[in-house]
Image (spheres, helix red, strand yellow):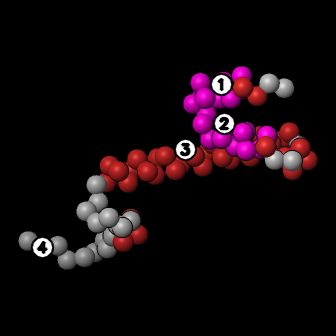
Amino acid sequence: MLTHPTLDHLKALRLDGMAEVFVEMQAQDSAADLSHAEWLGLLVDREVASRETKRFEARMRSARLRHVGACPEDVVPYAARPR
């Protein structure tokens, strides 16, 4: 099987997470023991995780939080507000 055309197609479809794990799994010997369904499941899981990470990073950039180490968990919803 030719891997370069497959990688080119994945990248053209903007499936970068799948392309990354495809390359990783080609290099591993243990990937040969997986069934087709397991292989596809790993590809899809990585793509979903990659997209969720990108969405989260975009939200954090657009939030423009004032503190460098700030995260949504640090927000106190009922804090007294200055007048």
Q: Nearer the viewer, mark 4 or mark 1?
A: 1
The CA distance from mark 4 to mark 2 is 50 Å
Label 2: state its secondary structure.
helix
**Magenta region includes residue 23:** yes
* N-term-proximal mark, 2 vs 3: 2
Which image quadrant is residue 70 in?
A: bottom left
- Image point (89%, 44%), residue name: 32
Residue type pointed to by label 1 = Asp
> According to the image, label 3 marks what residue?
51
Task: Give left or right: position of 67 versus 37.
Answer: left
- Image point (62%, 41%), residue name: 17
Place of residue 40 in the rendered image (x, y in percent of width and height, measured from the top left)? 77, 40
- Marks 1/2 in contact by CB < 8 Å: the verdict is no
Q: Residues within 10 Å of mark 2 (few under 14, many from 20)?
A: many
What is the residue that sits farthest to the left in this orientation?
Answer: 83
Q: Nearer the viewer, mark 4 or mark 2?
A: 2
Residue type pointed to by label 2 = Ala
**Above or below, 48 relative to 75:** above
What is the residue that sits farthest to the front in this orientation?
Answer: 27
Residue type pointed to by label 4 = Pro
> According to the image, label 4 marks what residue?
82
Residue closer to the observer: 9 or 79 = 9
Label 1: state its secondary structure.
helix
Chief SS of the magenta region: helix
> According to the image, label 2 marks what residue?
19
The CA distance from mark 1 to mark 2 is 9 Å
Q: Which residues are magenta?
A: 5-26
Q: Residues within 10 Å of mark 1 (few under 14, many from 20)?
A: few
* N-term-proximal mark, 1 vs 3: 1
Q: Which mark is residue 8?
A: 1
